[in-house]
Image (cartoon, grey):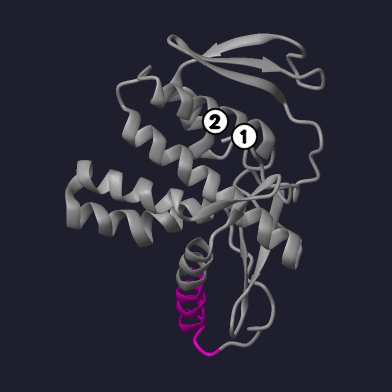
Amino acid sequence: MNKLNSGLTASGITQPEISKAEATPEGIRIVYSANAVCANSEKLVAYKKAVTWLDKGRYDYDPLSGYRIAAAFLVGVDNGYLPFSDAGAMAAYRWIVSVIYFGEQAHKNGVIDVPDRTGGTCKAAIYKGRHASITIYPLQLRTLLNDAFEATVFKQYGRKGGTKVVIMALVNMFNPGGDSFVMSPFGNEFFSRILEQLILHIKNSRDGSGGNNEPVKPVIH
């Protein structure tokens, strides 16, 4: 993988924190860019820690840095540098899919500020559904993937077999698109289906209250 979705700029970040990430047998060697807090320095990060950064959202709004970590992680998996490769690869692909979809919806429909758990705000993209709109953000999308898809697959195929099925599905959710990654028809249909279900659930929970034309602003958990 050597391409990045050019639409992932909802946060306004134009200078990534990480200029290079390289897979090594000992971990991922990260080179920080000149604008980072630890400018122009290097750091060796364990694979497990690096993929946790992605899963927890550290680079959701710095997608180029996150992509470099994800790409290095997957190279490490391919080279056999880590024993938990399937679970780690699933987390890396889940992150990639979530930020691509978030970026495309942000580019298409715009972004707004939503409350975060620190008491501040962060950027959320607007998803325009058939009957209502809702705000979305990468961490939320990964949670939906887990709850709406992965848990069901694990129940049917078991953890080991299910992980391989999930990875195959995640890989099929995006395609190369010129100099970027884009969501595939399968990926778009998947997210549309689960987001429409989420909108329906929210509407049914409102007890008949109005405001269906305004994007729902969920607090990030």
Can you tell which mark lies on residue 42? none
Q: Quadrant of the N terminus?
A: top right
Residue 181 against residue 66 in the figure, above or below: below
| Residue 198, percent from left and from top | 48, 72
Residue for point 53% across, 90% down: 208
Are there few (<14), some (14-19), or many (20+) residues within 10 Å of tag 1?
few
Element on which disc 2 rests: helix
Does residue 221 appear in this view? no
State which region is magenta. Answer: 195-208
Towards the viewer: 112 or 156: 156
Return the residue at label 1.
Answer: 2
Q: In the shown orientation, is residue 221 left or right of residue 20?
A: left
Residue 17 against residue 12 in the figure, above or below: above
Towards the viewer: 137 or 218: 137
Residue 9 against residue 62 in the figure, above or below: below
Whether residue 202 appears in magenta in the rendering, the answer is yes
- Mark nearest the camera among 1 and 2 is 1
Q: Residue furthest bottom?
A: 208
| Residue 156, percent from left and from top | 18, 57
State the separation of the CA atoms marked 1 and 2. Answer: 8 Å
Q: Residue furthest front?
A: 178
Residue 15, image quadrant = top right
Return the residue at label 2.
Answer: 71
Q: Are marks 1 and 2 in contact (CB under 8 Å)?
A: yes
Dominant secondary-structure state across the stretch colored magenta: helix
- The amino acid pointed to by label 1 is Asn
